[in-house]
Image (cartoon, helix red, strand yellow):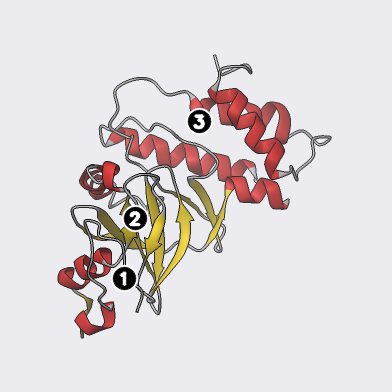
Amino acid sequence: MQKLPKLNLVLTLRYHDYTNEGGLIMESYQALAKTVLISDKNNRLIHSDDSLTLVGTGRSAFVFKIKSSNKVIKIFFPRFAHIASEEADIYKLLKDISYFPVIYESGPNYIVMEFIEGLTLFQCITQGKPVTPNHINEVEDALSLASQKGLNPSDIHLRNIIITSQDEIKIIDVARFKQTKDCTQWDDIKKAYYQLYHKRFFPKKIPAPLLNTVAFLYKKKLIPTYG
């Protein structure tokens, strides 16, 4: 048997050993999180339990679908582990707003939330699935409701807005909703939508490399922004 690297997390446990009639209990989520081994140096995934399927990789975390369930577990990289509690607190503030996922549990380095089936706006644009004005209006509504909770919706981009299989909007990755500085990213996306994408002549399918290049230039402030 291959010896796993010695890191902070070294247990390999299966979540179904910790279930009860009500489903997964907190101890089982903790045990499941402990099966995920991540390199401290380059945030490389080394190991995870067979009951987990990797469905997303972000700047600070991996997201796994828990097999035979409608839940995902978001495991933060070691140096970003503190974000777990911060983001969980924000999700709790948003719990009565349907545009945001339901959170079930959180721990020192993880959050368990509902699995959302659908496509991000990035995927919609690269695959040619139409993004309608109604979708844009729903995002506006979601961010307005979040603001009414005393939050400052920030870091909104094409990869954290999802159009679900029911054609509804869901917004994920809310860790920066408590930052105090102004963020114009959503306003810039909305402006680009109406001034470019929504025009009849504009292509509704854009290759991912081109879209990534636009995002890179935007971050470098090399293309015009809102306002």
Give the quadrant of residue 174. top left
Image quarter of the N terminus:
bottom left
- Which residue is located at x 31 percent, y 67 percent? 4
Disc 3 to disc 2: CB gap under 8 Å: no
Query: Along the polypeptide, which appears first: circle 2 or circle 1?
Result: 1
Q: For mark 3, what is the residue?
A: 186
- Which residue is located at x 37 percent, y 76 percent? 51
- Which residue is located at x 61 percent, y 24 percent? 217
Give the quadrant of residue 37. bottom left
Label 3 Cα crowd, 10 Å radius (few <14 / some 14-19 / many 20+)? many
In the image: residue 151, left or right of residue 168: left
Disc 2 to disc 1: CB gap under 8 Å: no
- Using the numbered discs, state the Cα–Cα distance from disc 3 to disc 2 in whole angstroms: 32 Å
**Which x, y percent locates residue 221?**
56, 17
Give the amino acid at mark 3: Trp
Residue 3 disc label = 1
Residue that lies at the very extreme toward the top in this rendered image? 227
- Using the numbered discs, state the Cα–Cα distance from disc 1 to disc 3 in whole angstroms: 46 Å
Label 1 Cα crowd, 10 Å radius (few <14 / some 14-19 / many 20+)? few
Q: Is residue 135 above or below residue 114?
A: above
In the image: residue 205, left or right of residue 155: right
Q: Is residue 106 above or below residue 218?
A: below
> Does dot 2 land on a helix, a strand or a loop?
strand
| Circle 2 or circle 1, nearest the eye | 1
**Which x, y percent locates residue 26?**
17, 68
Image quarter of the C terminus:
top right
Q: For mark 2, what is the residue?
A: 38
Query: Along the polypeptide, which appears first: circle 1 or circle 3?
Result: 1
Give the amino acid at mark 2: Ile
In the image: residue 224, left or right of residue 162: right
Residue that lies at the very extreme toward the right in this rendered image? 201
